[in-house]
Image: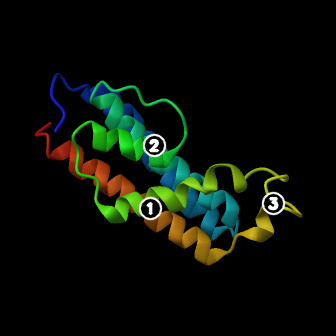
Amino acid sequence: MPTGPLDEKEYSRWRAEADHALEGARVQLAAGLHNWACFAAEQSAQLALKGLLHGFGKGAWGHDLVRLGSLAHDAGLIVPADVVDATRRLGRHYVATRYPDAHAEGPPGPHYGEADAREAIRDAEAIVGFVDHAWKSLGV
């Protein structure tokens, strides 16, 4: 487990934005904007993990969810296999959901469906849940 002073204010700042991004993912799912729902879900997970790491006083730069999960592990946390899998799936949505040249043909939208968005939101919820559990386990 992490040792040293914890920065609850910094954790809370990032964690609140994770909730906003997750709500955005749900709104975009309802609107049929599946690629954007996947991206917002990825952002939610990224913000939550970065908040946890910043709360520990660890540098949390970059956008790779797998790396951020590894940094949480390196900080002394046990990252469950389902959370590691969720970081792998969600991390794929960082670029391909947004850029017209990320796919061999056409814009990103047609490459994503409702099932993709629902899975991305479930994965984000799993990661955010892990972050919340990890933070609470520190007795903060």
Tell me the residue that label 2 is attached to: 67
How crowded is the residue under tag 3: few (<14 C-alpha within 10 Å), some, or many (20+)? few
Compute the Cα span from label 2 to label 1.
12 Å
Select label 2 or label 1 by which is in front: 2
Q: Quadrant of the C terminus?
A: top left
Q: Amino acid at mark 3?
A: His
Residue 114 can be seen in this image = yes
Compute the Cα span from label 2 to label 3.
24 Å
Where in the figure is residue 126, as x and y percent of width and height? Answer: 37, 61
Tell me the residue that label 1 is attached to: 86
The residue that appears at 43% across and 31% down in the rendered structure is 60
The quarter of the picture where residue 68 lies is top left
Residue 20 can be seen in this image = no
Q: Quadrant of the N terminus?
A: top left
The answer to whether 69 is drawn above or below residue 126 in the figure is above
Asked which secondary structure carries label 3, the reply is: loop
The quarter of the picture where residue 35 lies is bottom right
How crowded is the residue under tag 1: few (<14 C-alpha within 10 Å), some, or many (20+)? many
Where in the figure is residue 92, as x and y percent of width and height? Answer: 60, 57
Q: Amino acid at mark 1?
A: Ala
Where in the figure is residue 96, as x and y percent of width and height? Answer: 71, 55
